Amino acid sequence: MFPSEIRGLHASEREVAYKKMLAEDNRQDSLGLRISAGVSLSEEEIDALMRLLTHRCQAHTKQEVEHSLRSVPYIRSFGIYSRVLLSDPHVGVSYCAGQDYSSEITEVRRLLKGG
């Protein structure tokens, strides 16, 4: 099943179908996949993403990023979001950097803010 097919399901069926897709296809859960599939983030995942993406940011930036993370099924997807990896809530989240970790985290934050 593809993330776009999951997006077409009723909200109550999305999470089950999404977890099944991850298991069957042996995929790594990521912010990019969640957005594509229209699957919301848990409170624990939002908290972990906020720690990763908004460390040392001003309050208004944190508010904008948090608003986007709470609206994951409705925000626009960008390829860089696939580098934001989600794992077990107890383990946390991580970012798989390409060349420059700091500028890439800044770009993810800028896109989440609507930039």
Image (tube, rainbow, N blue to C red):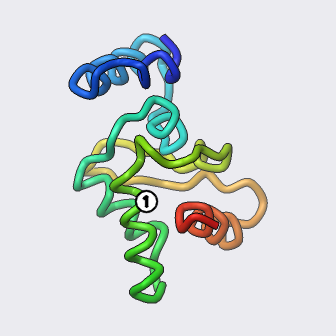
Residues packed near mark 1 inside 10 Å, few (<14), some (14 to 19) or many (20 plus): some
The residue closer to the viewer here, 40 or 50, is 40
Quadrant of the frame with the C terminus: bottom right
Labels in figure, total = 1
The residue under the point 66% across, 49% down is 80
Q: Is residue 73 above or below residue 96?
A: above
Q: Is residue 77 above or below residue 7?
A: below
In the visual, does 101 lie left or right of 10? Answer: right
Asked where in the image residue 20 lies, by quadrant, the reply is top left
Q: Name the element at disc 1.
A: helix
In the visual, does 35 lie left or right of 39? Answer: right
The kind of residue tagged 1 is Ser
Residue 86 position, x and y percent, is 42, 45
The residue under the point 44% across, 37% down is 34
Q: Is residue 17 above or below residue 65?
A: above
- The residue beneath circle 1 is 68
The residue under the point 39% across, 87% down is 59
Residue 3 position, x and y percent, is 50, 23
Q: Is residue 69 above or below residue 34?
A: below
Residue 99 position, x and y percent, is 78, 60
Residue 16 position, x and y percent, is 26, 20
The residue closer to the viewer here, 57 or 40, is 40
In the visual, does 67 lie left or right of 4? Answer: left
